Amino acid sequence: MKLYGLNPINSYVSCVRVIDRLCGQNVTYVQVTEDFRKSDEYKKMTTTDQFPLLQTDEGCIHETTAICKYLCAVAGKYLGNNAVQRSQVDQWISFNNSSLSNHAKTVYQGVFGWAKHDSATYNAAINDLKKNIRVMNTALEGKKFLLGDDLSVADIIIANCLMYGFQTVLDQGFMKSIKNVNDWAARVFALPEHIHVFGKVQMCQKPLKPVLAEAPKKEEKKKAAPVAAAPKKKVDEKPKSNTDLLPPSDFNIYDFKTFYINHPDKKGKGMDEAYKMIDWEGYSFWKFEYDIYEGEGEKVHMCNNLIGGFLSRAEGVSKICFARHVVLGDEPNLQIYGVWLVRGKTEVPDGLRKDHPSFEYYRSRLLDPRNNKADDKLVRAYWGGNEGDVIDGKMIARTMKWFK
């Protein structure tokens, strides 16, 4: 059998791969290309032109749920041991497809920026998602899995739907209130077959904030002004940020980034020249320290994910900032820091301080590398160092990522 998909790490494809490993069917994954998608061979295989697509000796099957149930049926596993359990499998899958997945999709769109919803839509979705998870919590009372002591395909499909939520918005405060779901998720995510496909799932400590669309502005009805009335002053539609209110600067940060990134001696001569180029009245250096929660600093890849998410959400200030984020220390006690050059002399830009959904989890300190030797040494170490260097006198750099 062959499993066709556009992306091997797509959650729907990955869900099928977990079931495949549980059932021992040894399905081969095939990466679909645009040329293959246009071929007559593919057109004969497909019904809906949707992925994943499973090719079997008996015919082709679309949709994750159908493929997963087929693999279980062939293996004679995970579909329930009697008529009631088989119906309960269908019940829980239907619950997932009609309720959980719809609310989860809206929440993930907001959290990952795949689509922008207004706050009312997002809040309604996450509240409904939590409400449905509480339904599961009640149903799991006294059980290991949805059917009782035995794992079923419904457990895998629902865990796959909720996995992003457990990692991003369903924080420890909420999870403590749904102990049955918490324990159930831990059991599913601990399955060797699940770890093989997804790796270890890290439950979130603090919920990420969504990227929301601005609420539409209400149009005010215009009233006829008296003949003798003075003309009204024009009101700015959008309040200015703290960087918009700064005096103009002739510092070309784009040229500065190009110069510094390409300089062979970033810690020495490169930094010396950088200090000469910077507009010190219009820009400043800051050190950011992430307020790491228990469990977040256990693995380098977990910290890398946190850095990647933070930097991707900072794209709005890329024209006025330049930085390097690093992971320091040893597992399981890693730390995340960043040294930033930002627009503004005494404040962090509003684009970070107010608009970035995760900035509140960082502590910031203004640096003065021109007049403070310790700050100068710190900036050179962060911006001029390499992975494996000792930073801050004691911690080894595991990861170093530029924000430019």
Image (cartoon, helix red, strand yellow):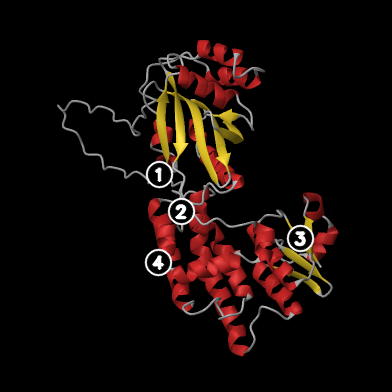
Q: Percent from the top left, x then y, of residue 85?
A: 59, 85
**30 vs 148, nearest the viewer:** 148
Tag 3: amino acid: Tyr
Structural distance between the alpha carbons of marks 1 and 2? 27 Å
Q: Nearer the viewer, mark 2 or mark 3?
A: 2
Q: Percent from the top left, x then y, of residue 275?
A: 51, 13
Tag 4: amino acid: Ser
Structural distance between the alpha carbons of marks 2 and 4? 14 Å
Residue under label 2, please give it.
205
Q: Nearer the viewer, mark 3 or mark 4?
A: 4
**104 vs 235, nearest the viewer:** 104
Is the residue under label 4 in contact with that under label 1 (CB below 8 Å)? no
Structural distance between the alpha carbons of marks 2 and 3? 36 Å
Residue under label 1, please give it.
214
Checking the image for residue 177, the label placed there is 4
Q: Secondary structure at mark 2?
A: loop
Checking the image for residue 4, the label placed there is 3
- Pointer 1 or 3: first along the chain: 3
Is the residue under label 3 in contact with that under label 2 (CB below 8 Å)? no
